[in-house]
Image (cartoon, grey):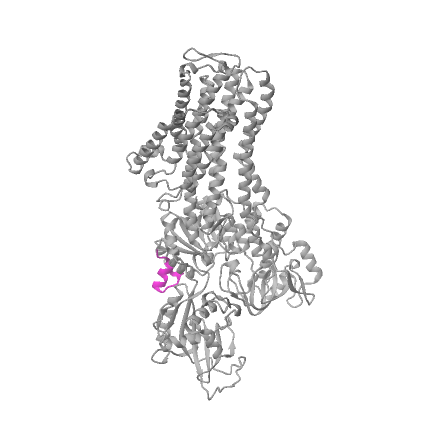
Amino acid sequence: MSTTKRRWSSTTSLRGLRRASAMQHSMMDMSQISVLKEESHTGDHFLTPTQLENIYRTNVNTGLSESFAEELLERYGPNELKELRGTSYWKIFRHNLFGWFQCVLWIGAILNFVAFFCAAKIDAHSETGGHSPKEYLYLGFVITATVVGTGLFGFYQEAKNAAVMSGFEKLVPPNAVVIRDGIKKTVPNSDLVIGDIVEMKSGDIVPADVRILTCSNFNTDMSSLTGESEPIKHRPECTHSNPLESRNMAYFSCPITEGVAKAMVIATGQMTQIGKIAGLVTGLEKEETPISKEITHFIKLICGVAFAFGFIFFVMVYVIQKSWLSALQYMLGIILANVPEGLIVTLTVCMTLSAKQLKSKNCLAKTLQAVETLGSTSCICSDKTGTLTQNQMSVSHLFCNFKIIDYNDHSHVSNPTYSTLCVAASLNLKATFAHETMHKPIEKRKILGDASESAILRYMEVNRSATQLREENPKEAEIPFSSAYKYQVTIHRMQLSRSYYLIMKGAPEIVVEYCSRVHTDEGPQTLSPQIKKELKANFIKMANMGERVIGYCDLKLPVDTYPIGYKFDVQKRNFPVEDLIFLGAIAMIDPPRPDIEKYISLCRQAGIKVVMVTGDHPVTALAISRKCGTITYPTSYDYAFEHHIDLADVPPHIRVQFKATVITGDELRKMSVNDLKNAQMRYSEITFARTSPQQKLFIVETYQSLGYVVAVTGDGVNDSPALKKADIGVAMGINGTEVSKKAADMILLDDNFASIVLGVQEGRRIFDNLKKTIAYTLTSNTPEMLPFVLYACLGLPLPIPLMLILVINVGTDLLPAMSLAYETSEEDIMKIPPRKLEDHLVNKVLLFMAYFQVGLIQFFGGMYAYFVVFAQDGFFPSSLMFIRNEWETRRAVVKDTLGRDWLYLDRKKVERKAQTAYFVAVCWTQISDVIICKTRRISIIKKGMKNHVLNVSIIVDLVAALCVTYFPLCNEVFNTEALSWYDFFLACPFMVLMVAGDEIRRYLIRNNISQWVERETYY
């Protein structure tokens, strides 16, 4: 005994040390997170009340002394949970206004403002032209407006969805009833300490983690903690080695559904089971989402290229021209040409549009990035209750007359045994319909009672008018259900027979032991050992289908022995409870959602592994997995059932042959990380049963370490650590707790797994469309950057000014880029595996296509229009080479190819016309670019122009080009010049060339004619 005491004392000391550590540090380091990830190893459920008194220095009758309780409160802190904080508004604001991309644009805006102030002073005495101060000012303001506008828009979208939930504080009761110094008193729940003796009753919430000392019909709802849908019936004795499974333990925040109990507090605050979960959720760091990584990778790449080229040109121009202002002008031109300022608007709008479309499919994304993450998912760890199933127990089978009858089979209603079973099941019920919902259809009425009784009542009300039957045949006596004898007895006064009717229900293997006969349609038969064995085989068969089975037996009490008015005494048992007649059984299950198998199959077809992670019994979990389709192969459980042996007796060489398995929480406790990794790689289908919150987290982290992008679904407090750690956490909107909603990234408004599958499809479409958008946006970088190369190296008049570059980037390109977000998905989007982590949003093939193929065609189209307009006024290409210095000197006279003299203002007008022609050419070729970006494989003819937003954007693009070209106010603001009508169409041949060339490319890829073309051009 002394050894036992020392062992438990050391355990308690360790717990105390951990508690002190947790209380001393407000910010959790990795060691504390590791402690919280450990499962509870307390042995308090093994100990006797006397041993508990010795360890906790308390008394089960008089409780702690007030002074010692105050000392413990001072030492360990209050019985409170750490508040689960969401992402702060400031963090969301900072992310949207000062992210990587935004910072690059801020630098661009600042450089423009610097150039404005410097240009005003230096250009006052300069002979050369160049950019006027107002152009720099315009550019600075436009870039600033772009960053602020998109930043505020993104902040509004994320803040709106992120701040609708509260945290753990709703789980904590305000007060608790304790015994201290032998006096019963009510104290604030936060003042509870370990060793306190508390009293609890129905309707309360368990005030801390407690060990039950005495109880009467004491039930708690542990569904949010363990996932177990049925209320737990507690007793003072230890029933399991695992403290979460033992019936003599109750846990902080669990509602008490029935009965009263006296208990000892063994853990408070952060060291309770719920406190550890709160600590985990608060302390865990979320992995960066795949799309965030991709956008960061892309931005760093683009910005690196932009600043590298910008710096090279700055140095080169400064060495040649000895003017730092000219060098700054070149650098700004290169940076602005490379950095697509409108892309951040496009990305924000694309994500927002997709989030809205997802919401219409019952998926609420709390962050814009979460939308795409769902599309990258390669593994879904799904909770069972309410996600794969309907979260409503319903009758599935009836067993009578030695037959298992489906609940929809009404061909037996006139059979005597079936009819008697239905009457007995209708009468022996505690559940009732809520009075205020009696006017509603039966399936929508609220029921007061546990899940199993509710299922029977609803079924019997439809088939037997159970409410009326109970009113006509009132209950006269009752023996309540007890876990000790596992049955319930009711006695009813029957109206028609004017006699008493006794009904017993309970665990079928227990009920049958109280029977000597069995009902059949031919009349009662003697219950022989052979018949009893047959009955039990049927019970096992239904249990193996994952169903909860309740057995029934009855006895019509003889009127001469039990006349009307007889006083039944349930204490003395002055009525028979043996030699009864076995009636049959009713089986219930939380059925899978309609079409769930179809959606699981879709996931499998899309290369997504679906894993059920539940707190339910492994047999139930396996049965539901089979019905849902998450397990399709045989398992060692099936082998054990078929061969009538225990699971432990299945030979190891047989076990390793199976492709599917059920791993229980007990097995997980014995596994190392490598053991679990090996299991996840060995088995193609896995269901995890009887798992704890820490184990769910362990499962998620192990899948992530294997390279999976993991989505986790859940609705309980116990799911919140895994929801927080997953790449994307998906909470239930209807039945989900506030804590789970706050920890998640996305909320299913209809609690339906099918919505996740639709979300995956939407996420994949988003990624494809983002690729198309970026390819479209980057293409114009080449015709925007190369003119500065020609300007610097060949001395040409500048083909396109900075202002028109900005008009393209945040003007004409913006709507077509956003319209690609409305493109429908490719036909085979759910038939291809999830994208690999190395499949970047922007890869070298996309860059090659954008910059060196499509981009060069646009550049040639622009230069063709530029040279044609100059040639019309006498400046052939040969005479434009190396005349930059003369061209921009105000007092210089420049000769054209024909020998005519041109003054500064006249030649600048021609230059503006040529620049306008170059701008219009880029607009035309960008229209063809957005058309070829609609699809990456299938023909544009087959795809069609059904995206009406894109069609409108093309029209708007043309109208914008016309306004910039011909509208006098735009000519003044953007420094453009009106063109002849035929010059407006100079780039059309290049537009046709782009569409035709890309159609040929897609034809070659689609028909596998050239692997080289696919490898080098399919991005």
Task: Determine the residue located farthest toward the right in the rendered image.
Answer: 67
- Residue 818 at what x, y percent from top left? 45, 38
In the image, residue 577 lies in the stretch drawn in magenta? no
- Residue 963 at what x, y percent from top left? 47, 30
User: Within the image, what quadrant is residue 71 found in?
Assistant: bottom right
Q: Nearer the viewer, residue 959 or 309?
A: 959
- Magenta stretch: give its range: 633-650
Judged by its main secondary structure, the magenta piece is helix
Name the residue rendered at 45%, 61% in the picture.
617
Quadrant where the C terminus sits is top left
Q: Is residue 305 visible?
A: no
Quadrant where the N terminus sits is bottom right
In the image, residue 639 lies in the stretch drawn in magenta? yes
Is 923 placed above or below 630 here?
above
- Residue 660 at what x, y percent from top left? 37, 54
Image check: 825 left or right of 85?
left
Q: Is residue 921 visible?
A: yes
Query: What is the tally of numbered marks visible in this picture?
Result: 0
Q: Nearer the viewer, residue 746 or 256?
A: 746
Task: Determine the residue located farthest toward the bottom in the rendered image.
Answer: 560
Is 514 placed above or below 283 here?
below
Image check: 745 left or right of 825?
right
- Residue 9 at what x, y percent from top left? 60, 58
Name the residue rendered at 47%, 49% in the picture.
359
User: Within the image, what quadrant is residue 630 found in?
Assistant: bottom left
Image check: 396 left or right of 216?
left
